Amino acid sequence: QVQLVESGGGLVQAGDSLRLSCAASGRTFSSVAMGWFRQAPGKEREFVAAISRRGGGTNYADSVKDRFTISRDYVKNTVYLQMNSLKPEDTAVYYCAAARTVVPSRSSLEYNYWGQGTQVTVSS
């Protein structure tokens, strides 16, 4: 079992930055790949970014590439999502997820554990 708790969401203006955190407990942190997904009102949940078990591989949605950065800290058992140059279309609930896979998958079906989500709202 892996328990995930997100934090760092909030209300910001377009062009601002935010850093989301996801603290993991339970199963060994280094044994799971980690991902971030988001869901806007009336839309399906979509992939944002993922990082491999060892941190050497990352994967990003085209919509956030060059603006968002995913990273992980094995001492703090935490995964981060640094979000720069935020846009109103980034507004969503952001979810952290863990997968018992090696590669940083884009598919939500690969993820076994999910956090409760944190709201990010970007005003224009």
Image (tube, rainbow, N blue to C red):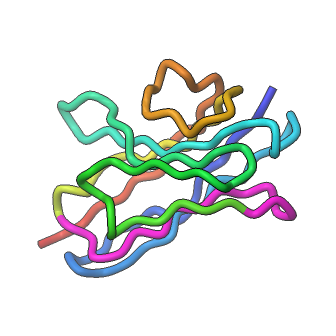
Residue 112 lies left or right of residue 96; in this view the side is right
> Which image quarter: residue 72?
bottom right
> Which image quarter: residue 41?
top left
Asked if residue 84 is among those painted magenta in the image, a careful observer would answer: yes
Residue 78, horizontal then vertical, whole percent = 72, 57
The C terminus lies in quadrant: bottom left
**Residue visible at 18% across and 31% down in the picture:** 42
**Residue visible at 18% across and 69% down in the picture:** 123
- Between 43 and 62, the one nearer to me in the picture: 62
Residue 112 lies left or right of residue 95; in this view the side is right
Image position of 96 with respect to 89: above or below: above
Q: Which residues are magenta?
A: 73-87
- Between 120 and 59, the one nearer to me in the picture: 59
Farthest-out residue, front:
56
Residue 62, horizontal then vertical, whole percent = 26, 51
**Residue visible at 67% across and 28% down in the picture:** 101
**Residue visible at 33% across and 36% down in the picture:** 46
Image position of 54 with respect to 104: above or below: below
Residue 89, horizontal then vertical, whole percent = 17, 56
Asked if residue 9 is among those painted magenta in the image, a careful observer would answer: no
Image position of 82 with respect to 72: above or below: below
Farthest-out residue, top:
109
Residue 2, horizontal then vertical, whole percent = 77, 33
